Image (cartoon, helix red, strand yellow):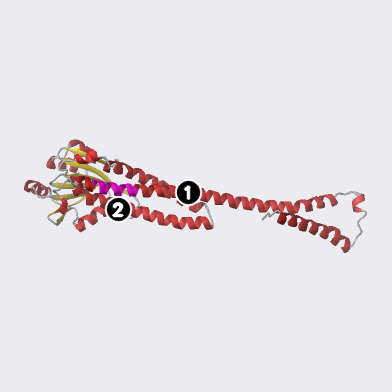
């Protein structure tokens, strides 16, 4: 496992790799702070749970990353499991958030550009001490905005693939469209539990410190997640439509080649018959034909050319292309 990286933001001052004594001082002084830890060990999580009074079940949850999005009341605090993306917008980053009116703790196993941007902007620190959803609103919005950027990137890529499919469909486009569809489905499954949580009004109102404005911020988060999930659902549907289009165009090209081969076979069928007929080694056939160029051009070349012209005329009359 990679080494532990952490920082604490209190009163607008960021301290990297903070000493445990600093955390204890802030807790005793009742000064709000935001503590972020990347790659926390089980021992470190246990220490935080003891020092900050985190619920034992919540601490155990943070030792097992790979969970679904959830929102739980743990004693006098709130546990939120949310998701962002890495810097390349490729892999999901699971973030565990512990919030009380005195502090915010975020735990993760990988770098999170969304959290780093929030730290630099200082948009979470002023909200600490307010109701939980209002305080977590900037963090949640920043995490899921990354998914909106990913959906836009995938949609633009599908525009390019659509033009390539219309021009000339091959296995490369088929594989990439399938990969985008699979990725959109996985991302949608990650986001759907969070969307459902944001719509659970009784749970939101039961959070410690909830106020009259809590529901307004919850609805804003819900609308954002509804839109993101809808975007990935639309991408899945668009990929399915492109796959159908790819198959249709491929079938059309195969049918076109088959028709052309059938046309060629139709043209050469009577010629093959003539060649087979006059090639029979019977005296009544071979002995009656005079030698010389005139007989060859009339009976050999002329008759074959007449068959070709007749077949082409018939095919063109029937609109065979």
Q: How many residues crowd mark 1 within 10 Å: few (<14), some (14–19), many (20+)?
A: few
Q: Position of residue 126 (x, y in %)?
A: 15, 54
Quadrant of residue 198 in the image? Answer: top left
In this view, the residue farthest toward the top is 57
Q: Main secondary structure of the magenta part?
A: helix
Between 56 and 203, the one lying in front of the other is 203
**What separation in Å lies between label 2 and label 1 (alpha carbons)?**
26 Å
Drawn side of residue 264 relative to residue 212, left or right: right
Identify the residue at image location x=79%, y=59%.
Answer: 305
Q: Position of residue 294 (x, y in %)?
A: 88, 63
Q: Is residue 309 visible?
A: yes
Identify the residue position indicated by label 2 in the image: 145
The numbered disc on residue 297 is none
Drawn side of residue 292 relative to residue 51, left or right: right
Between 122 and 319, the one lying in front of the other is 319
Identify the residue at image location x=39%, y=45%.
Answer: 185
Q: Position of residue 55 (x, y in %)?
A: 17, 37
The numbered disc on residue 241 is 1
Q: Position of residue 122 (x, y in %)?
A: 18, 56
Q: Is residue 18 magenta?
A: no
| Numbered disc 1: secondary structure | helix
Drawn side of residue 28 relative to residue 263, left or right: left
Identify the residue at image location x=42%, y=56%.
Answer: 157
Between 43 and 313, the one lying in front of the other is 313
User: Which residues are drawn in magenta?
Assistant: 218-228
């Amino acid at each position: 496992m990679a080494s532990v990286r952490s920082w604490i933001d209190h009163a607008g001052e960021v301290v990297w790799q903070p000493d445990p004594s600093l955390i204890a001082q802030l807790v005793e002084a009742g000064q709000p702070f935001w503590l972020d830890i990347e790659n926390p060990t089980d021992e470190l999580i246990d220490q935080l749970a003891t020092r900050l009074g985190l619920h034992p079940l919540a601490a155990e949850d943070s030792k097992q990353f790979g969970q679904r999005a959830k929102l739980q009341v743990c004693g006098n605090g709130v546990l939120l499991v949310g998701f962002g993306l890495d810097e390349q917008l490729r892999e999901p980053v699971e973030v565990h958030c512990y919030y009380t009116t005195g502090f915010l703790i975020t735990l993760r196993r990988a770098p999170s550009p969304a959290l780093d941007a929030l730290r630099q902007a200082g948009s979470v620190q002023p909200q600490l001490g307010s109701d939980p959803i209002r305080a977590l609103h900037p963090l949640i919005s920043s995490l899921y905005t990354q998914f909106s950027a990913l959906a836009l990137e995938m949609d633009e890529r599908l525009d390019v693939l659509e033009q390539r499919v219309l021009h000339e469909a091959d296995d490369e486009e088929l594989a990439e469209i399938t990969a985008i569809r699979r990725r959109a489905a996985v991302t949608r499954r990650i986001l759907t539990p969070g969307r459902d949580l944001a719509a659970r009004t009784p749970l939101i109102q039961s959070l410690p410190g909830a106020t009259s404005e809590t529901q307004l911020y919850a609805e804003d988060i819900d609308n954002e997640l509804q839109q993101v999930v809808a975007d990935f659902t639309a991408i899945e549907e668009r990929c399915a439509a492109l796959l159908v289009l790819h198959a249709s165009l491929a079938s059309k090209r195969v049918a076109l080649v088959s028709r052309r081969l059938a046309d060629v076979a139709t043209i050469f069928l009577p010629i093959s018959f003539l060649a087979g007929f006059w090639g029979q080694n019977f005296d009544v056939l071979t002995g009656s034909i005079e030698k010389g160029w005139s007989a060859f051009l009339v009976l050999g070349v002329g008759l074959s050319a007449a068959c070709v012209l007749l077949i082409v005329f018939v095919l063109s009359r029937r609109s065979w292309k």
